[in-house]
Image (tube, rainbow, N blue to C red):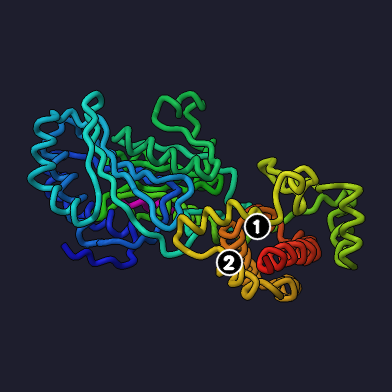
Amino acid sequence: MKKIEKFFDINMVLMTIFAALEGVRTHEQIELVYDIDTTIPKELKGDVETVTHLLSQLLKFVFQNTPNHEVILHLRAPEDFLYQEFISFEVEDTHISKEKAESFFEARLKLPLEKLDGEVKYEEETSKITVSVPFKLQDIGNRRYYRLPDIGMLGKKVLIISKSKIVANSLKKMFKYFLYEVDVGAEEYKKRGSNLAHYDIFVLDEALVTEGIEQLVRTVQKEQDFKFVVLQDVYNTEVVNKDFVSASLVKPVMQESIFELIISLFEKDVKERKIKKEMQKPVINMEKYIIDAFRRSEEAYMEAEEIAPYIPVKNSISAEIPVPLTKEEESSLKVLNREYGQDRCKQMGVDYVKELESYVEAFGKSDYYFREIVKNKASWQIKEFAIDLEKRSKQIGAERMAKIAERIGLLFVYDNLDMLPVYTGKFHLELKKLLKEIETYLKK
């Protein structure tokens, strides 16, 4: 059978299936939740039509035969997703008999699985059904990294109350990805003293919104910046249009939905943020003087590094961002881990020598480019450069360079862009070391 492969957005496939199964979900009173590993790239290459048909058939069968009214479809993938990997689609504790499941596999899933080179497995002990399908990746390193762009979006407290326990716990997991403090349900709310003002975000199932809740939310919003989010089905917009509602979460909710929600809730607040200075005490910014010293020359940076391997910069949630690499990290990471790079390229089916040559062509003089975009404070160009640098460095086994690129990216997360000039000298020196090792290897 001919397999038609193309690049597609797995999120869109899941949303299409969710909508297509609306009738059977409603009839069987099923709450469907997607639980997606962050290791799964958003964009994959495969036979999207057959995948959509396969998953629709699987979920429809589960809905019609499980006694459960809450179903979770887990998407699992290896931690290090390379050129081609299997993604597993799992439904646990179906309480469907082995005979019925295997009969269904033979009748409905055999042909699409053969077309996809996939496989299906039934675990009798847990009645778990697992469908595994191989997918290719368009871009190495194209993972689901969700990094909040401003420190003002970090450190929030969230209350989630939903009719469905699995929906609430799924949302909790997704908010906790951003290190948010999350309470779920009325009991945890009571433990906080039944004080809604304790939270920054309140997520409530649309079916639970009452006049009393509305009045309480309005009262809190008068006193503080309080976000009220309605969890809703796609067809119901009655509650969402009210002025006390900050935003809505439309099912199916995925990690990307939470990321976009946070951005929409706090983007305006961040733009209007004003920093108040304490007038009684002079503020001496030692960081500024350190940066100025590092700007003068690469030698100045190296001398300062000998005195203090890293300078911890603390933000409001006590995270520490070391200036580029500590001595311990430098000794533990290789300039060029050829064995790792060769193995990675082999798994991708590409030639390691050609990857090295391509890297030199792309980044051979990138230290000048990096210095220029930092000087011009071109934030988006810096961010894209760091992402590309990290991805390509990991590919060839340039461990130390990949770590530096990762640190540059973290500066955007913690709103610490004033430290960027520190990295220009270090990047220049590290690039020279890396290019020398690549040149030595290529001459062999």
- The image shows residue 222 at horizontal and vertical percentages of 52, 47
Determine whether 313 is above or below 368 in the image: above
Is residue 415 shown to the viewer in this render?
no
Q: Amino acid at mark 2?
A: Val
* Residue under the point 55% across and 41% down: 179
- The image shows residue 121 at horizontal and vertical percentages of 23, 37
- The image shows residue 391 at horizontal and vertical percentages of 56, 60
Horizontal side of residue 127 vs 327, given as left or right: left
Horizontal side of residue 58 vs 43, given as left or right: left
Is residue 46 shown to the viewer in this render?
yes
Determine whether 128 is above or below 274 in the image: above
Q: Residues within 10 Å of mark 2 (few under 14, many from 20)?
A: some
For this rendering, which residue is in front, 416 or 86? 86
Q: Is label 2 in a helix, a strand or a loop? A: helix
Q: Amino acid at mark 1?
A: Ala
* Mark 2 or mark 1: whose residue is earlier in sequence: 2
Q: Nearer the viewer, mark 2 or mark 1?
A: 2
Q: Which residue is mark 2?
A: 353
Residue 226: image tag: none
Q: Is residue 247 magenta?
A: yes
Range drawn in magenta:
245-251
Horizontal side of residue 399 vs 354, given as left or right: right
Q: Quadrant of the rendered structure where residue 53 is?
A: bottom left
Q: Which residue is mark 1?
A: 398
Q: Quadrant of the rendered structure where residue 353 is?
A: bottom right
**Quadrant position of the N terminus in the picture:** bottom left
Tell how many labels: 2
